[in-house]
Amino acid sequence: MEFNQQDNNNNSIISVDKNAVILSHVTLPIPCFISSSHYIKTPNLTLEKLDKMALFPLSSKDDIDLLIIGTGKTGKFLDPQQQVAIQQMGIGVESMSNASACRSFNLLLADVRLVGLLLL
């Protein structure tokens, strides 16, 4: 799926497929984490392994107040304990399909929101 670039933000998403996400300046394999000024590969992270310890190094690189989690081709819900743990970090969380997550991330990034995207 391809996206139109809405602004000149370096980390806005150009396109995504089941294996990779393309930003304006780099292609990242999935799984990965992207924020307004930071991106990193997260090869060992899965939905089941998602917790405070896994998220802290990602969220500390760039201040975020909302984490969008892309769960693959279809949307999957987080375990309620995972949601509570992330919210205890002061971060709102939403999970959805990767395509929806990328669209939402671009939209919020264009609104200059403190948003992070975790594609699994």
Image: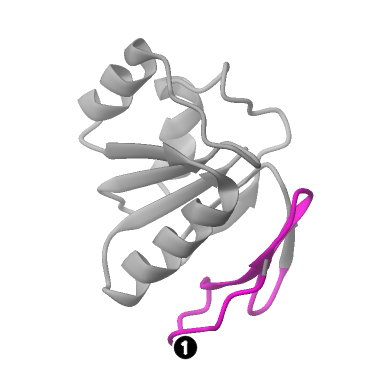
In the current view of this chain or complex, which residue is farthest to the front? 74
Q: Residue at x 26, y 64 (%)?
A: 113
Q: Residue at x 44, y 68 (%)?
A: 106
Q: Return the x and y of residue 2 as percentages of the image width and height.
A: 66, 73
Q: Residue at x 57, y 24 (%)?
A: 47
Task: Judge left or right: residue 89 versus residue 110.
Answer: left
Find disc 1 in the rendering and name its residue.
8
In the current view of this chain or complex, which residue is farthest to the bottom? 8
Magenta span has 25? yes
Looking at the rendered structure, the secondary structure element under dot 1 is loop
Q: Amino acid at mark 1?
A: Asn
Query: How was the colour assigned to the protein in this rendering?
Result: one colour
The quarter of the rendered structure image containing the N terminus is bottom right
Q: Return the x and y of residue 20 as percentages of the image width and height.
A: 75, 55
Q: Chief secondary structure of the magenta span?
A: loop
- 54 shown above or below 6: above
The quarter of the rendered structure image containing the C terminus is top right
| Disc 1 crowd, CA 10 A, few/some/many (<14, 14-19, 20+) | few
Q: Return the x and y of residue 3 as percentages of the image width and height.
A: 58, 75
- For the image, the number of numbered tags is 1
- 62 shown above or below 36: above
For residue 17, what is the image quadrant? bottom right
Task: Judge left or right: residue 26 versus residue 80.
Answer: right
Give the residues drawn in magenta, as a range: 2-26
Task: Judge left or right: residue 67 versus residue 22.
Answer: left
Q: Residue at x 40, y 22 (%)?
A: 52
Magenta span has 38? no
Q: Return the x and y of residue 77 as percentages of the image width and height.
A: 44, 25
- 91 shown above or below 49: below
